[in-house]
Image: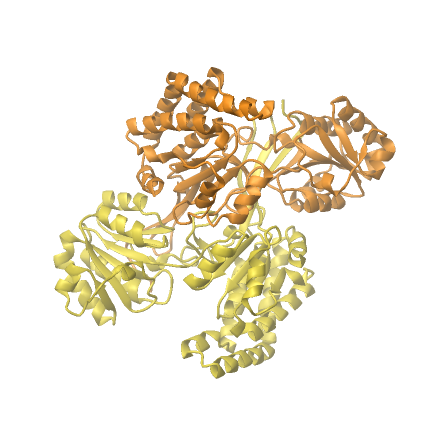
Chain colours: A orange, B yellow
Amino acid sequence: MRAKAAAALLAPVSRGEKDRVLLAMAEALLARSAGILAANAEDVAAARAAGTPGAMVDRLTLTEARLAGMADGLRQVATLDDPVGEVVRGRVLPNGMELRQVRVPLGVVGIIYEARPNVTVDAAGLCLKSGNAVLLRGSASAVRSNTALVEVLRDVAAAGGLPADVVQLVPGLDHDSVKHLMRLRGLVDVLIPRGGAGLIRAVVEESTVPVIETGVGNCHVYVDVDADLDQALAITVNAKTHRVSVCNAAETLLVHRGVAQRFLPRVLAALHDAGVAVHGDEAVCAVDPRAVPATDDDWAAEYLSLDMAVRVVDSLDDAVAHIRRWGSGHTEAIVTRSLGASRRFITSCDSAAVMVNASTRFTDGERFGMGAEIGISTQKLHARGPMGLPELTSTTWVGVGDGHLVS
Amino acid sequence: MRAKAAAALLAPVSRGEKDRVLLAMAEALLARSAGILAANAEDVAAARAAGTPGAMVDRLTLTEARLAGMADGLRQVATLDDPVGEVVRGRVLPNGMELRQVRVPLGVVGIIYEARPNVTVDAAGLCLKSGNAVLLRGSASAVRSNTALVEVLRDVAAAGGLPADVVQLVPGLDHDSVKHLMRLRGLVDVLIPRGGAGLIRAVVEESTVPVIETGVGNCHVYVDVDADLDQALAITVNAKTHRVSVCNAAETLLVHRGVAQRFLPRVLAALHDAGVAVHGDEAVCAVDPRAVPATDDDWAAEYLSLDMAVRVVDSLDDAVAHIRRWGSGHTEAIVTRSLGASRRFITSCDSAAVMVNASTRFTDGERFGMGAEIGISTQKLHARGPMGLPELTSTTWVGVGDGHLVS
């Protein structure tokens, strides 16, 4: 309820005021780094004592450099256009009434996320700029870090004349507090879970608050019969290996039977050279003794690792059917010189993004020129693909008349 | 699953083909009216036998004229622009990649609705034009009419080369079939309940499929201290009495204390003359002996009848606070000559539509120039306000490169 009240006060605040607060937040993170790092050190020590794997401890750990990165993120958000008030459409009706559809904040945005404390600052910055109050529900392992970060952000908001409650950490560390958050329909306007497939599924199943699904990416590269095979090789390796732990990395390679004989030996050698374990269908295993036979689990997998499923398909339509059957609707790439094939692939896939002769890794708010993103939506409602500031808004219709009546 | 398969086939169909099918559907409704009217007569007889109130029997009843109205509706949808393929945004990225965001169908749309059989035809037409397969779940009382109508629509779709399964009636008449529909996440892309507040609440609570809330309208008219009182009077009477059973009718009148003494006697007399029962606060009841004291139930009510709650407020901010506390987020109107007051009201209300010096009754897809609408959304995600064809679409990002890699 405090968030809802704060959101009402934040909605009409001008861009200038919001940007001043964002810049002051960036400075305060650096000025008060000692306290933040001390709180983080406690989280890190507790995680080590609990036997947390090294990679997760690393994601949890803050340094002066990482704090500087968060501060830079806030400064970058300050440079982005304010989506609030943007006129999306407008016209004068035949009766003389002016009608326009304008962007307004969503209201209260809840973010449920896992280890990284940088999400705390990124999400708060994006929500503030788009005029929304934010309820942050990070993981228990980062609670001291998140508490310290949120305290700084709240202090700066209050000093800048905004309600401190525009940024709040959801109290409670057990699942009950998440459950409670998911039931606050009417108070919370949208929930955005950021994390693994399990977290996202749980929120989607249990929430009565509208949810925006983010991030699960079982992305495909399809090499068409008309592909430039040099491009196909480079795109496959880039999409698979440039960064394996992210949702826009490719997980499955589909190769048209017409080029399989020429392309498979090259691409499989390149993947093995890059350290990729190949899970192949019969045709692939026949060519490559190092390939492991693929099962349905492989077609469905978001590996997030140096693994790739590889399959030979008889046609573009078969590739599309495979993608529609097994994909997560994130990003699919086709490599082809055929305009007709690219058109058919674009209109037949049912995904947030389709790349033609480009790596799946391009699906990203910053690479799309949107500035920072709060996540990549894989659902069809409201926002699909990278979510920047406009995706954190709703709209209102404004009609201005002169005593206009309906007759 | 049949709807999902049909949706995949419908998505790439051109506007010309879809329009030809829509026009053929319109003709077939008239050509096969005898069978439809006979089926409807059975529904009507059963409703009468069950003691259904006359107004509901009337809504259920089809005539040649009403069938002609449905056919006209389909013809009108055929004249509307196809939203599929519309480029929403586009640019060339600094690396030379072309990037564009294009509208695509949602996929499978489920509509859950009450008595009126015309919704069957309207919804099918709008979904077909926007490239979506539709699952129709009408009320048990209209099942014979809906079955006859859907049979005609499916026959025409199939004759036109489209899968008949682009239009389907959900089998089963009990609540279990609705429950099942609400759990088909992954098969059904969105559910749109059209009906009373109880139906909508049940769907929102139980559905794992994303829902678009429609229709509940507790709309307000606020008469500012700077109002033109003649306009205020006309707008209040129009918003309340032009048609009382619709969601954009006004239910509560808020009057600034500074004009209450001059305005209340006039508006209360006019409302009484129009047959409106007034539920007033103390100030109103002091002026009008016929007014009934209002309770919290009145401030919360969507009367849909010749009743109106009337309250005196101390300021524009108090009016906004009342609206935010009690409103349903549908449509609010302010009557004022003050530009500042109108600006403040627009940015402070949190509703799908705000009218300045105009009746709340204007919130309507046809009046907004969108053509037919599938409903009026009162939620903030995806679509807010009247939902026309573009609101029945999602988007896909398309990136076209020439071997572009992420580095």
Viewport quadrant of the N terminus of chain A? top left
Q: Residue furthest front?
A: A49
Front one among A299 and B17: A299
Q: Residue at x 15, y 53 (%)?
A: B257
Q: Looking at the image, is A107 positioned above or below residue B277?
A: above
Q: Which residue is drawn at 74% across and 22% down?
A: A274
Q: Looking at the image, is B246 positioned above or below residue B330?
A: below
Q: Is residue A105 visible?
A: no
- In this rendering, would A290 be left or right of B19? right
Q: Residue at x 40, y 16 (%)?
A: A34
Q: Which residue is drawn at 69% across and 44% down?
A: A326
Task: Give coordinates of residue A151: x percent, y percent.
Answer: 36, 27
Q: Quadrant of residue A332?
A: top right
- In this rendering, would A369 be left or right of A242? left
Viewport quadrant of the C terminus of chain A? bottom left
Task: Give coordinates of residue A253: x percent, y percent.
Answer: 74, 35
Task: Give coordinates of residue B347: x percent, y percent.
Answer: 31, 43
Q: Quadrant of residue B131?
A: bottom right
Q: Looking at the image, is A240 positioned above or below residue A383?
A: above
- In this rendering, would B218 be left or right of A284? left
